[in-house]
Amino acid sequence: MLWEELGFTYMGPVDGHNIRELEIALTQARDYYFKPTFVHVITTKGKGYLPAEGDAVYFHGVSPKSKNISTKVIPAYSEVFAQTVLRLARDNPRMVVITPAMPEGNCLSIVEAEFPQRVFDVGICEQHAVTFAAGLATQGFIPIVAIYSTF
């Protein structure tokens, strides 16, 4: 197995929703304190909450609800960003958009719908997104990289 070849102790897969099984795996992993240990835990995003289980993309970054609900609708920063990117993309065919697995979270689906060949979802790989953007810039493209600041 790959992990052992790299010098890791591999444990799993473990059902992350089975607390007893998870507890046993983590207790056993503690015994390997002298070397890197990889505990492979499998979970279902939103497990037990049907709306989240049915729409993992929407529930990826849900904000808490405010007790003081205003009647004024203020667009989210991501929505304003995406609308601005779309307007700029219409004006400049050299502009490309790169996102690491967050086209929906960054509201960039609207850009992707109009310019599918100019939006690149590189998966969960922020470092690659930035390096890819640098490479494209050297070739005359204008890359816009959308990464959540918490990452």
Image (cartoon, helix red, strand yellow):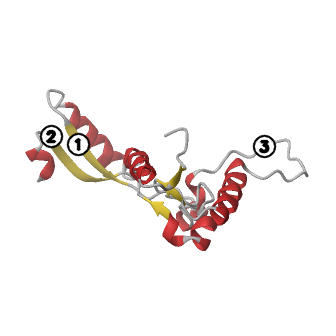
Residue ID at (46%, 62%)? 120
Which residue bears the numbered disc 1? Answer: 38
Distance (Cα) linking label 2 and label 1: 6 Å
Q: Which mark is residue 106?
A: none
Which residue bears the numbered disc 3? Answer: 66
Q: Which mark is residue 8?
A: 2
The reply to whether callout 3 and callout 2 are in contact (CB within 8 Å) is no
User: Going by the picture, which residue comes out furthest to the front?
Assistant: 140
Specify the amino acid type for callout 2.
Answer: Phe
Specify the amino acid type for callout 1.
Answer: Phe
Q: Position of residue 48 (x, y in %)?
A: 52, 59
Mark 3, residues whose alpha carbon is within 10 Å: few (<14), some, or many (≥20)? few
Q: Earlier in the sequence, mark 3 or mark 1?
A: 1
User: Going by the picture, which residue comes out furthest to the top?
Assistant: 34
Left or right: residue 114 compared with residue 102: right
> Does residue 36 sit above or below 62 in this rendering?
above
Quadrant of residue 57 within the rendered picture = bottom right
Label 3's element? loop
Mark 2, residues whose alpha carbon is within 10 Å: few (<14), some, or many (≥20)? some
Left or right: residue 138 compared with residue 106: left
Residue ID at (71%, 59%)? 83
**Number of numbered discs overlaid on the protein picture:** 3
Specify the amino acid type for callout 3.
Answer: Ser
Q: Position of residue 46 (x, y in %)?
A: 52, 56
Left or right: residue 29 compared with residue 83: left
Residue ID at (65%, 57%)? 85
Looking at the image, which is closer to me, 95 or 50?
95
Looking at the image, which is closer to me, 34 or 126?
126
Left or right: residue 59 compared with residue 6: right
Q: Earlier in the sequence, mark 3 or mark 2?
A: 2
Label 1's element? strand
